[in-house]
């Protein structure tokens, strides 16, 4: 990315970054952010050439705001046509890693897809198909599941999960769903409370009359933490342990928007502290974009 040519206006704005008057700083920062990502090299150059930590922190925050502005636009576009779940997860990962390479993520998923596809055939039962996916994903590629921890935002992010081969149920689950979508395996996330669980759907579930209980469209369940399969009985027992009635809406498949919204809401909890509260707010504002 080449820096913006430093004309008089940009020079003056950069010079005013350390203005102690909050109103002046607010005006200056809004103007700089409005230039978009072309201003980032100028800000980075300034950061490298000053030795004042408070001022460096201001510049870091400005760079973050520029990235966030671009990310919000990207999210709004994705939300209009949310057909690609992996794309949604890549945009979320860019919140923490604005310079990440989306192609690297896609190439890695394509490698796993190809190896899985070689082992599949049309004569396999649904359980046999999922056993093949599990065998490649968890045994051959050694993907591990880790419990959700709000101290570890990287466990939620698709690029880090693929890189370290470990993720929580949500990031593993999104990769697993993306793979199954590419392989024409009818797997969907379902709305089971306090879990991120996938359901293997009947092939005709999208054409079934809405009055049918959504649970009847699910053949069995998959836990993306480790690939474990669960029966309807297992899920009913889970509801009993929670003392929650198993209402029909819990078995409804979640669309891509809802999956990414769940990811954003959970990731936001990683920043529930004074220092990072603005990040929590930003992630929840992205999540609310998906309500529209």
Image (cartoon, helix red, strand yellow):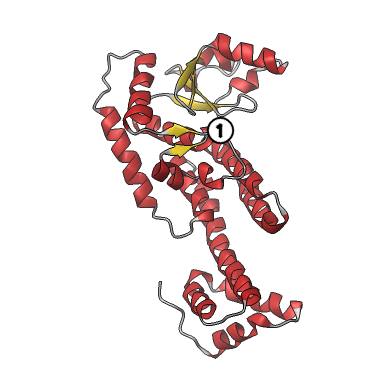
**In x, y percent, where is residue 135?**
34, 24
The residue positioned 49% from the left and 69% from the top of the image is 37
The answer to whether residue 70 is above or below residue 158 is: below
Is residue 146 shown left or right of residue 268? Answer: left
Q: Number of marks in the image?
A: 1
Q: Residue at x 56, y 82 (%)?
A: 50
Q: Tell me, yes or no, if residue 84 can be seen here.
A: no
Whether residue 133 sits left or right of residue 151 in the image: it is: left
Residue at 66% from the left image edge and 44% from the top image edge: 269
Question: What residue is rendered at 73% in x and 81% in y?
Answer: 20
Residue 114, image x, y percentages: 27, 34
Would residue 277 be visible to someone looking at this image? yes
| Residue holding disc 1 | 147
Residue 75's place in the image compared with 134, above or below, is below
Which quadrant of the figure contains the N terminus? bottom left
Side (left or right) of 229 relative to 23: left
Categorize mark 1 by other alpha carbons within 10 Å: few (<14), some (14-19), many (20+). few
Which of the pair 239/183 is nearer the observer?
A: 239
């Amino acid at each position: 990315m080449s820096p913006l040519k430093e004309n008089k206006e940009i020079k003056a704005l950069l010079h005013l970054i350390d203005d102690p008057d909050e109103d002046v700083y607010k005006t200056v920062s809004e103007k700089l952010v409005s230039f978009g990502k072309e201003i980032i090299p100028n800000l980075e150059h300034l950061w490298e050439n000053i030795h004042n930590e408070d001022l460096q922190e201001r510049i870091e925050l400005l760079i973050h705001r520029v990235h966030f502005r671009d990310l919000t636009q990207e999210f709004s576009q994705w939300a209009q046509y949310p057909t690609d779940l992996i794309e949604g997860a890549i945009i979320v990962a860019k919140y923490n890693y604005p310079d990440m390479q989306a192609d690297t993520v896609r190439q890695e998923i394509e490698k796993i897809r190809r190896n899985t596809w070689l082992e599949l055939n049309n004569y396999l039962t649904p359980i046999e198909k999922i056993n093949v996916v599990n065998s490649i994903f968890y045994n051959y590629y050694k993907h591990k599941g880790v419990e959700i921890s709000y101290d570890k935002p990287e466990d939620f992010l698709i690029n880090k999960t693929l890189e370290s081969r470990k993720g929580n149920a949500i990031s593993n689950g999104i990769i697993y769903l993306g793979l199954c979508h590419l392989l024409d395996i009818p797997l969907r996330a379902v709305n089971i409370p306090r879990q991120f669980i996938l359901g293997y759907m009947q092939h005709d579930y999208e054409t079934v009359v809405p009055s049918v209980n959504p649970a009847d469209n699910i053949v069995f369940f998959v836990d993306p933490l480790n690939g474990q399969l669960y029966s309807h009985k297992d899920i009913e027992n889970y509801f009993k342990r929670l003392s929650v009635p198993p209402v029909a809406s819990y078995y409804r498949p979640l669309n891509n928007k809802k999956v990414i919204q769940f990811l954003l809401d959970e990731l936001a909890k990683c920043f529930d502290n004074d220092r990072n509260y603005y990040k929590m707010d930003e992630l929840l504002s992205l999540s609310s974009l998906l309500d529209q």
